[in-house]
Image (cartoon, rainbow, N blue to C red):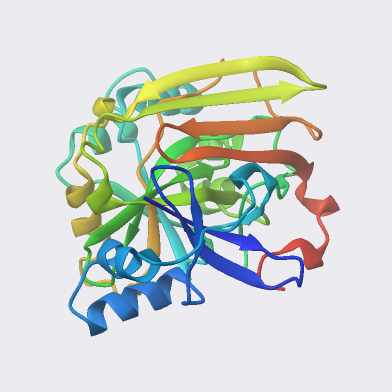
Amino acid sequence: MRIIRFKKESNVEQLAVVTNGNNIFELKVDSFQDLITEAEKHNKSCSQIIEEEIMNKQSIPQELSELELLAPIVSDEVWAAGVTYLKSKEARNREAKVQTNSFYDKVYDAERPEIFLKSTARRLIGPDTPVGIRADSNWQIPEPELALVVKADGEILGYTIGNDMSSRDIEGENPLYLPQAKMWKHSCSIGPAILLADTIDDPYNLEIECRIYRKGILISKGNANTSMLKRSYNELVSYLIKDNDIVDGTTLLTGTCIIPDDSFTLEEGDVIEIEIESIGVLRNPVKLASNIFKGELINE
């Protein structure tokens, strides 16, 4: 069971559910946060509330591919975990030009994970909206990640796809530059759906694939599985909420282990596709952040 948001012909944003049979049902609540509130009000899960609502409801006639999908949730904040996969640690060491006993080695093995603020609602985008690349970076890549959607108390409600855009040369120059290497206009996308947590058997066995196209030609492809993650999702969330107030619907990216060859950097006009089984495909074209108009920001 997947939650989506799409734009109707009337330009109204609509929350809906996609069932296992790929039928789409519009929901009466306006947002995923409202769905959380409704579930809490009736002491039920989100999936129970949905099942009761659509029991005798007619599905919409459109196919999923015919809808103009939006980010499935507008999170006030998107956080991210870093160096959670072995390949990520090795890549970070190459960026920083160190071999052993680096701060990346230490955080990979430490009890405390790396957690940082990745995006705010104003910077967050959904499917088919351009992700931005920085004009002051010469080494930029997407980071395909499974993202957790959590409640204020840390309960994991669902899973979506996240693209944690990264400027490798900026972070490699100095780790204190991490905020600039991670956060700028359109540097984070999520979507196309939220897979509800209580409708999936094993979130630690999901296939992830990232494809990058240039002028219509596939130039980079990588695969991974969430079973390769070093830390548990609950472990990451537990550190996110330590002495830290979050709100319902906060998103936490869990890290990546799909990293293009070190000679690769994104260019304007590239297209990134990130696919996670049972969730869908998050597709974003690439554009210079300086060429993205303010009106393209999700909340403006």
- Count of picture labels: 0
Where does the image place residue 163, in percent across and percent down from the top left?
Answer: 53, 42
Q: Is residue 247 above or below residue 274?
A: below
Confirm whether residue 239 shows in the render.
yes
State the residue at coordinates (44%, 41%).
Answer: 279
Q: Residue at x 23, y 67 (%)?
A: 45
- Give the camera-side residue of 289 and 299: 299
Residue nearer the viewer, 210 or 16: 16
Estimate the x, y position of residue 99 in percent, counting from the top left.
36, 17
Is 53 on the left-hand or right-hand side of 284?
left
Q: Nearer the viewer, residue 285 or 59?
A: 59
Q: In this view, does 149 lie to the left or right of 279?
A: left
Residue 18, given in percent of the width and then of the height, sits at 46, 51
Which residue is depicted at the point 64% across and 51% down? 62
Q: In which quarter of the image is the C terminus?
A: bottom right
Check the image and report above or below for 27 versus 234. Answer: below
Q: In this view, does 58 lie above or below 128?
A: below
Q: Where is residue 184 in the image (x, y as percent from the top left)?
A: 64, 55
Q: Residue at x 47, y 70 (%)?
A: 27
Q: Is residue 121 visible?
A: no
Locate residue 56 relative to residue 274 in the image: left or right.
Answer: left
Can you tell which quarter of the image residue 135 is in? Answer: top right
**Residue 210 appears in which quarter of the rendering?**
top right
